[in-house]
Amino acid sequence: MLSDVAVDHREKAYALLKADADKILRLIKVQMDNLTMPQCPLYEEVLDTQMFGLSREIHFAVRLNLISDEEGKALLDNLEKQLNVLHEAAQES
C-alpha cells in the first residue's frame, strides 16, 4: 500500500505532466491561430520539440514510479488526439 506521501507525489507528478501537455496544446493553438500554418517548418519544429520534451518528462516520471507507463502513454495519446483535431480544423479553414 502506498503511503499518503507517495500518493501525493504521484498525484503532483501527474498534475504537472498534464499541465505541461495542456501548455503544449495552448502553444500550438496560438501558433496555428496567429503565426503559422501546420505545413510550416517552424510549426513542425515547435511541435516536435515540445512533444519530445514531454515524452522525456513522462519517461522520467515512469522510471521514478511516479506514474504508470499506461498513464504516460494515455497523456501523450490524448494530447496527440487533441492536436489532430486542431490540425484538421486548421485545414478546413
Image: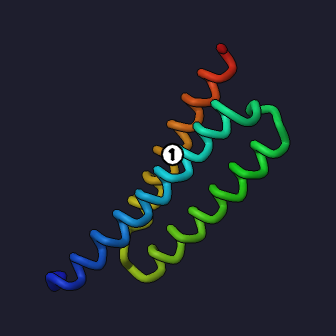
Q: Which residue lies furthest to the front in this view?
A: 34
Residue 64, quarter of picture? bottom left
Is residue 21 shown left or right of residue 88? left
* Image spot of residue 69 (x, y percent): 44, 65
Residue lying at 46% horizontally and 50% vertically, measured from the top left: 22
Residue lying at 46% horizontally and 44% vertically, measured from the top left: 78
* Coloring applied to the structure: rainbow
Depth order, front residue of 80/27? 27
From the viewer's perspective, is residue 64 above or below residue 72?
below
Structural crowding at the residue carrying mark 1, measured as other residues with C-alpha within 10 Å and reported as few (<14), some (14–19) or many (≥20): some
Is residue 10 shown left or right of residue 23? left
* Image spot of residue 71 (x, y percent): 39, 59
* Image spot of residue 31 (x, y percent): 67, 39
Residue kind at label 1, given as amino acid type: Leu
Q: Residue furthest top?
A: 92
Residue denoted by label 1? 79
From the viewer's perspective, is residue 61 above or below residue 93?
below
Residue lying at 37% horizontally and 72% vertically, measured from the top left: 13
* Image spot of residue 8 (x, y percent): 22, 77
Is residue 63 shown left or right of residue 91? left
Depth order, front residue of 34/5? 34
From the viewer's perspective, is residue 11 above or below residue 22?
below
Depth order, front residue of 12/10? 12
Q: Helix, strand, or loop for circle 1? A: helix
Q: On the rendered image, what quadrant is the C terminus found in?
A: top right
